């Protein structure tokens, strides 16, 4: 299993490339809450003729396990989204990547938005899938955090052995069903996510601070960005994405009909068409 140490934590990574030796620009994929880079694999494979695709698992999720004992760097890390943006910067440094394309989803898209403003010189173009801004609601946020705490705390591993539980687990996230293998992989990632990382990022992603900061971050964007929403997304409704896109003339907005929180999997053909059009695949792409 390929691992690379980033700020004291071993991170899982995967390169997906075509068989040609032609030098290509690099596209880095960032996954969402309690997921892993493996749900990006089919998208990366479809884009591998034009990009060398780098997938990795965020700290505490997927196969990027947190150390059981505190180590010098990892002991000081928090679960603020800015810290995950710095993880991404350190990852690029480790692979000596000066400038990349970025494709990020859900919570990962929030991390990517922060990264775009911290390091705009390092990104050629960005795709944010299922991202947006929201207004602060004290009672709703408190209820969400309480419920989220229960969900993260009570995740018995045997749950994954119950027939069809993966379909029930994914139901809220989808408008179109996914193959069983993909749904089961999502459930496995959720069940194995580190407790502190899963809980910590719930509080940093959905917070009063985030509701105030993220609109400012979208307003500051200077990197050409495509924001993709799923028409029936219940997690980050399309209107939140539209509002975020309206804050910057650098952001192009696309709505994919009859999809929800995973449009790149629910309607891969349309998603890839929109992404390729935005990236100018077929034209000369900067390496």
Image: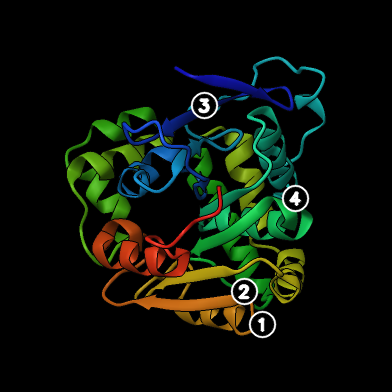
Q: Give the alpha-carbon distance from disc 3 to disc 1, as whole Å.
A: 34 Å
Kindly indicate whether the residue at mark 4 contacts the one at mark 3 (C-beta within 8 angstroms): no
Camera-side residue of 151 and 16: 16
- Which residue does the numbered mark 1 point to in the structure image? 247
- Which residue does the numbered mark 3 point to in the structure image? 12
Camera-side residue of 42 and 65: 42
Q: Is residue 13 above or below residue 33?
A: above
Which one is earlier in the sequence, the residue at label 4 or at label 2? 4
Which one is earlier in the sequence, the residue at label 1 or at label 4? 4
Q: Please give the name of the residue rendered at 61% of the width and 44% of the height, measured from the top-left corner.
A: 199
What percent of the width, then of the height, locates residue 91?
65, 34
How would you rate the neighbour count of disc 3 (Cα within 10 Å): few for under 14, some for 14-19, many for 20 or more? many
Which image quadrant is residue 223 in? bottom right
What percent of the width, then of the height, locates residue 53?
45, 41
The secondary structure type at the circle numbered 2 is loop
**Horizontally, is 160 left or right of 51 in the view?**
left
Q: Give the alpha-carbon distance from disc 1 to disc 2, as whole Å.
A: 10 Å
Q: Which mark is residue 82?
A: 4
- Which residue does the numbered mark 2 point to in the structure image? 133
Q: Which mark is residue 129?
A: none
Which one is earlier in the sequence, the residue at label 3 or at label 2? 3
How would you rate the neighbour count of disc 4 (Cα within 10 Å): few for under 14, some for 14-19, many for 20 or more? some
Q: Please give the name of the residue rendered at 65% of the width and 16% of the height, measured from the top-left corner.
A: 68
């Amino acid at each position: 299993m390929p691992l690379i140490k980033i700020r004291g934590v071993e991170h899982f990574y995967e390169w997906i490339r075509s068989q040609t030796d032609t030098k290509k620009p690099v596209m880095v994929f960032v996954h969402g809450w309690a997921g892993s880079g493996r749900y990006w694999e089919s998208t990366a494979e479809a884009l591998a003729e034009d990009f060398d695709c780098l997938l990795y698992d965020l700290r505490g999720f997927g196969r990027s396990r947190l150390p059981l004992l505190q180590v010098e760097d990892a002991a000081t890390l928090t679960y603020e989204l800015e810290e995950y943006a710095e993880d991404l910067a350190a990852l690029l440094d480790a692979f000596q990547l000066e400038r990349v394309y970025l494709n990020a989803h859900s919570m990962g898209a929030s991390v990517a938005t922060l990264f775009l403003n911290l390091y705009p010189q390092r990104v050629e173009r960005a795709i944010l899938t299922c991202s947006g801004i929201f207004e602060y609601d004290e009672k709703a946020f408190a209820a969400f955090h309480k419920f989220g705490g229960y969900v993260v705390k009570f995740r018995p591993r045997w749950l994954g052995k119950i027939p069809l539980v993966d379909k029930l687990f994914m139901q809220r996230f989808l408008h179109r069903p996914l193959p069983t293998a993909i749904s089961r992989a999502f459930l496995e990632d959720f069940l194995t996510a580190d407790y502190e990382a899963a809980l910590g990022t719930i509080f940093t992603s959905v917070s009063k601070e985030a509701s105030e900061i993220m609109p400012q971050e979208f307003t500051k964007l200077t990197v050409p960005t495509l924001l993709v929403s799923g028409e029936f997304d219940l997690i980050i409704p399309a209107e939140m994405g539209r509002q975020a896109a309206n804050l910057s003339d650098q952001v192009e907005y696309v709505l994919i009909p009859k999809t929800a929180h995973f449009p790149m999997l629910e309607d891969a053909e349309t998603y890839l068409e929109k992404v390729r059009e935005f990236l100018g695949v077929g034209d000369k792409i900067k390496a």
